[in-house]
Image: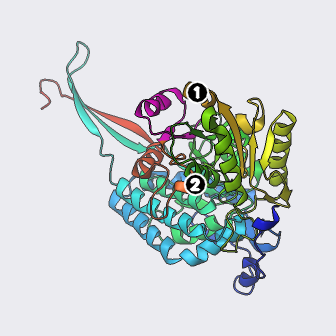
Amino acid sequence: MHPSTVAPAEATTYGERMDTIMPEPRACWVAGTPEQGETTATVTHPYDGSPVADAAVPGDQQVERAVQAASAAAATMRGTPARTRSAALATLATRLRDREEEITELITAECGTPITRTPAEVAQAAAFCEAAAETAPCGTGSAHRHPAAQDRPAAWVTTRPAPRGPVLGIGSSGAPLWVAVRHAASALAAGAPIVLKPAQRAPLSALLLGEMLADAELPTGWFSVLPTGHEATRALAADPRLPVVLASGAGSTGDRIAAAAGRKPVTHDGGGLGTAVVLSDWPDLARAAERVAAAGTAPGGVTSRATQRVIVEEPVADEFVALLSEAVRQRRTGSPYDDAVDVGPLPDEDAAGGVTDAIAEATAAGALVRAGGTRDGAVVEPTVLSGVDSGVALWERPVTGPVLAVRVAGSADEAYALAGHTPDGSAAGVFTRDTRRALHACERIDARSVTIGDVSAFSGELCAAGTAGEAGAEGVRAMVDALLADRRTVFLAEAGTELG
């Protein structure tokens, strides 16, 4: 690591402080009830490997009871009044804010997010609940008249959204609370039971969320929180009693989930290959470099919306790459409990090794390391590479780590072509002041969203505290809609009568 950017370590860990308060393994939640599991798993702090807490790991019978309860609760959840679900969501938002200090330390302890960033995750989760509370009463449906035909009378047809059924929500180790709350709040707004499966490395935030969900006056068994292993997770994804799967992330993890789910709809609420395009008309290259550096490295490049690819137009390429490299060198690594730290660790040393392997592949193909390029344990030094070949992993698929891969384009059109096709869920940011170029970018770049004048508005760096993030209210509505299907009711006219 760069010696000038390494912050000092914190002496006292979260785990040491909590041992005297909660020595018992953190309970899993089976059909809304806290239970100890058949086994336990020790959650360790990614920065130094120190133990944080033990979490209960449910056995097969507990998992089966959770799925049975979700299936049994589907009808009663569907019939729960929208105002009841809305009130439960508003209460959840309040409880998240009331316990912000506790939750922020927990997130830092289990996944290594710098302590200065975790309050934003809590605030964002609470804001999502508030937006979902406003969404819950929506969706009253529509009605239209079908005229009589030769073989049937006239009819009125009503269409209304209804939940597809119980939801499986598969969590993330990069933003454990945010993902768990998005999944649970979306299911609650839709009127569907949910089985939360938090990441094995970082289940504690979701287990704490279970405490808050248990207080809601909702049908028995409507939620479970099951920190299971890979085999049990694949079985849950394949279970027909959980007809909808919400997953976080992309790449190989998303592919495995989709394969296990088979024909069931799988909604990836994050992930993708974030791209920044810097065109020559942009007047403040230093500011653009700062924004790209932050979006690509905070909190450790582990957010599912991190910027990874950078395309810069040739007339400003040398200046911008130099500014970007310096901005990345200034990103401080160290203990995530240190207020001065910008970049936290990856989940473990294997994950960090995967990032340095991707860097090595890129350099073997001709890329130049302009900043960083090494790791210390689970901490990858913030890295910039230029001249990255289009065939390497850093350009073709999401790589979880604080790495920015840069290529130079001879024109704006070439930049858009290099941005090319991106995986589902990807987003792009284009730095330009030219309206024509901006409109052309939106047409040419095949991404779910294109932000003009900044990095992608869906990047982790821009999900501001106090906002719902991920496209705001529209993002909340889209999450809820993914859990709904139109149900039609046909009212036929009786013989000799006319429908009004």
Residue 477 position within the rendered picture, expressed as x and y whole percent measured from the top left: 41, 48
How many neighbours does mark 2 have within 10 angstroms: few (below 14), some (14-19), or many (20 or more)? many
Q: Is residue 446 magenta?
A: yes
Instruction: Say if residue 38 shows up in the picture.
Output: no
Residue 33 position within the rendered picture, expressed as x and y whole percent measured from the top left: 60, 69
Mark 1 or mark 2, earlier in chain: 1
Name the residue at 50% across, 48% down.
Answer: 457
Name the residue at 73% across, 69% down.
Answer: 55
Magenta residues (range) = 422-451
Residue denoted by label 2: 460
Residue 261 position within the rendered picture, expressed as x and y whole percent measured from the top left: 65, 39
**Circle on res. 411:** 1
Please state, as top left, top right, bottom left or bottom right, where the C terminus lies in the image.
top left
| Drawn side of residue 259 relative to residue 266, left or right | right
- Between 88 and 297, the one lying in front of the other is 297
* Picture layout, residue 90 above or below residue 260: below
Q: Is residue 62 magenta?
A: no
* Picture layout, residue 169 above or below residue 388: below
